[in-house]
Image (spheres, coloured by chain):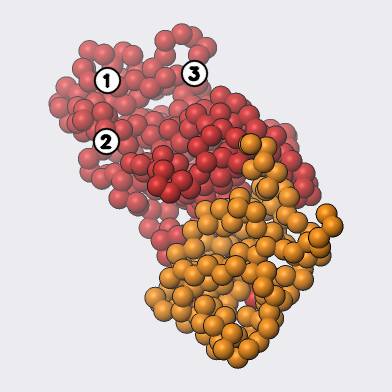
Chain colours: A orange, B red
Amino acid sequence: MSEAFEPKIVAYVCNWCTYLGADLAGTNRLEYPPNVRVLRLPCTGRIDFNLIVKAFEAGADAVLVSGCHPADCHYTSGNYHARRRWIVFRRLLETLGFEMERIHFTWISAAEGKKWQQVVTEITEKTRRLGPYTAYRDLCEAHQ
Amino acid sequence: MITRLRETCRRLLDQNKVQVVIGYGQRRPGAAAHPVFITRPEDVGQLTWGGNCFANLTVYLKRKEVKALGKAALVVKGCDERALVVLEKEAQVERGDLYVIGMACDGVHAPKCSACVVRTPRFADELIGEAGSAPGAASPAAPDLLDVLMAKPAAERWAFWKSEFSRCVKCYACRQVCPLCYCERCIVDKNRPVTIDTSASLKGNFAWHITRAFHLAARCVGCGECTRACPAGIPVGLLNRSLADTAKGNFGYAAGMDPAAEPVFGAWSSSDKEDFIR
């Protein structure tokens, strides 16, 4: 443990808003921590809960799910469907005793490069303070 | 009630209104009733009814070999009928292709019965028996396991499920016995890509139970068959109940109660409330 802990953060983002927001942060030369791994999907409505589970299985310390603001969905209602699903899915994670501070949801539009920078910085700092997420990794290692 | 049930079924079979009656039978006294599939009027004597009729027979409607028998008459309790309502809403059964025999029920000695709100089937083609005692009247004082669990800190809940799921052998009895788990090919049986590790390890077991619970979220009618079927004694139905509470609390939706209500995940609203999205 000589090396300092660097959190791994998986970000599932929608193609139309948050991905472009992150792109805008880049073209504006806004700096944010390199701990985030961005995975682009067509829409938040496409973000299956199993993807979130997979991220933790693969060793993520935190997961961010982000998409278009309500009323801004490219497909009209994908983010509304997603919101309902997250409300219920979060309850499932709570019932299981999951560490809820490791899962984040945001709305970030294509114009909010600044917000992307802030969100990623905050989540990285918070996760760094929390330390590595071992509870799920232990499940996976118990298997080997 | 048993006599009336048998007479009804004999009449239905005699008049060829249905080709098969799906009901409860009893081989040994004291044992749980088992499903019987009666196709000949002279066999109606096998049908029984009583406090040991736990099974939710709507589960057999999804089976190809049962569909092949022809039009069915189905014996349901009030709680089973809720599954029928969901199946119809999801276009899995055509109500006209089915003759529903509703049994007024005083409870089947299952924990779920203490909180029962539908002792009398509401949409049956034929109702047998008188409405039971007041709902929840016989409620025992035992503390509710879900309440106890949710009052614990997250780490203890995690430890609880870890210990429970460590016994899971991935027999999928919870899936097979569920009337609403009707996918022709379950996601756990798909291997390109592997979404859920199929080995009976903690990793695979968590992934499976998360998926099972969430695929039934806001659809589960709480018949409790999954918990009853589990050979390892895992209270899998707790997860479903927890999600049913959320569906009720956030969206005012109780699965299988109102045939006209829009399903939670089949609809959306711009006014859904949450406090966790920034």
Q: Is residue B15 left or right of residue A99?
A: left
Mark 3 belongs to which amino acid? Answer: Ala
Which image quadrant is residue B144 in? top right
Up-down relation of residue A44 to residue B42 (above or below): below
Q: Residues within 10 Å of mark 3 (few under 14, many from 20)?
A: some
- Identify the residue at horizontal 63%, vertical 80% (top origin): A116
Seen in the picture, residue B203 relative to A110 is either above or below; the reply is above
Residue A20 appears in the picture as rendered? yes
Q: Chain of mark 3?
A: B
Q: Residue furthest left?
A: B15
The amino acid at mark 1 is Ile
The front one of B219 and A113 is A113
Residues indicated by labels 1 and 3 sit on the same polypeptide chain: yes
* Chain holding disc 2: B
Q: Position of residue B255 (x, y in %)?
A: 47, 50
Tell me, yes or no, whether dots 2 and 3 are on the same chain. yes
Q: Is residue B98 left or right of residue A108?
A: left
Q: Which residue is mark 3?
A: B32
Is residue B32 or residue A71 the one in the foreground?
Answer: A71
Q: Which mark is residue B38?
A: 1
Residue A9, image x, y percentages: 65, 65
User: Whole-Å distance between the Cαs marked 1 and 2?
Assistant: 14 Å
Gap in angstroms between the C-alphas marked 2 and 3: 24 Å
> Of helix, strand and loop, which one carries label 2?
strand
Q: Position of residue B103 (x, y in %)?
A: 40, 31
Which residue was labeled with disc 2? B99
Q: CA distance from mark 1 to mark 3?
A: 18 Å
